[in-house]
Image (cartoon, helix red, strand yellow):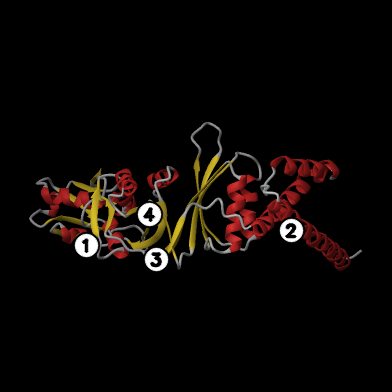
Amino acid sequence: MDLQALRAQINQLDETILSAFAQRMTICRQVGVYKKENHMPVFQKDREDQVIQRIRDMAPPDMSQSAAALFAAIMDISKCYQQQVLADASWMPPFQQVKTLSCTRAGCQGTRGSNSETALRMLFPGAEAKFYATFGDVCKAVGSGEIDFGILPIQNTTTGTVIPTYELLHQQVGYIAATVNLEIRHCLAIRKDMDPAKLTTVCSHPQALQQCSGFLRESGLEQLSYSNTATAARFVAQSPLPYAAVCSPRCAEQYGLRILRPDIADARENVTKFICFSKECLIPEQADTISIIAELPNRAGSLSRMLNKFAANGLDLQKLESRPVADGSFDVRFYLDFSGNVLDPRVNALLADLAGSLSEFRFLGNHLTLG
């Protein structure tokens, strides 16, 4: 038998499988209607475990695991399909849809001249800017109503994730309403009256120092970490010590520093993403990205099963960030961004399924991406 004949047999089997799949999904829809009428949840773990075990027992021994994985994927697709029938949005926190984001007070970590302030001004040019010592202080100010929105960095194209921001998001500090991408330019700045030959030390935020690690390694300067690039620049401007700051050109100008070397970052394209979050869930009309937290067990196939649900619903996964669950279980907490809007039935079906089947699920916001 030649290859073409074998492929013809496979094509015939594929048609049979497709027909059976369509029939199964029709019945699944009827099951979804029944569950809706009888106020039953879509995900019923005991039933799913029974089906998977039955498939394992029926399959040839050398195919039992593959057959189980196949039917697990089919059941995941079925659950999302049933969720569309139910149109259950009980997972969703109360939210307000808004045309635009506006506020009178917004806050960020650091001080005037920081990149965080620049991001704040991009979002709210007319708002009063308030500055806080730590990321946590920004979150507390949002929670207390002292400010309407908080601005925090979450990711950089050179150094990656800003882990403290993710840890605060897990503590449910608020909901992301927008993100803004800011091009970061680092320069080496000193006091105008300082002799560059006497320079011994450079000060900045740890991530800024890391983003300029090549230049700083060649310079041989001692490095000191500060909570913020602008805080470091302000210290250098006020100190008689032979120190320099790694900061933005705007920040150097803000504190009257002289730029000794411009553009010292290792990467030419250096961009930081900032989140804008509020206490209440605000969803801009043009919101195009959804952020969630999903906790998965340390079990074979758990991640692939979740990711298959995005593919089954035709949704584009933009980012997947993992952090360990600090309980000794080796379970993993994932932070996900994907394209979509909660008013889309496919999105609602996916999120309802995840909320009902995961040990931990948290909706972080449906936000607008700027820049």
- Of the image marks 1 and 3, the number of the one nearer the N terminus: 1
Give the foreground label among 1 and 4.
4
Element type at mark 2: helix
Mark 1: give few (<14), some (14-19) or many (20+) Cα within 10 Å.
some
Give the foreground label among 2 and 3.
2
How far is disc 1 from disc 4 in space, using C-alphas? Answer: 25 Å
How far is disc 4 from disc 3 in space, using C-alphas? Answer: 14 Å
Mark 3: give few (<14), some (14-19) or many (20+) Cα within 10 Å.
few
Label 2 sits on residue: 29
Q: Depth check: 149 or 165 in front?
A: 149
Q: Residue at x 52, y 63 (%)?
A: 341
Mark 2: give few (<14), some (14-19) or many (20+) Cα within 10 Å.
many
Q: Quadrant of residue 15?
A: bottom right
Element type at mark 1: helix
Give the foreground label among 2 and 1.
2
Disc number placed over residue 370 in the picture, else none: 3
- Of the image marks 1 and 4, the number of the one nearer the N terminus: 1
Give the foreground label among 4 and 2.
2
Disc number placed over residue 277 in the picture, else none: 4
Q: Depth check: 360 or 221 in front?
A: 360
Q: Residue at the far right: name it.
A: 1
- Of the image marks 4 and 3, the number of the one nearer the N terminus: 4
How far is disc 2 from disc 1 in space, using C-alphas? Answer: 59 Å
Element type at mark 3: strand
Disc number placed over residue 159 in the picture, else none: none
Q: Is residue 111 left or right of residue 155?
A: left
Q: Is residue 69 left or right of residue 23?
A: left
Image label count? 4
Label 1 sits on residue: 250
Answer whether residue 354 is visible to the viewer in this image: yes
Q: Residue at the far front: name it.
A: 37
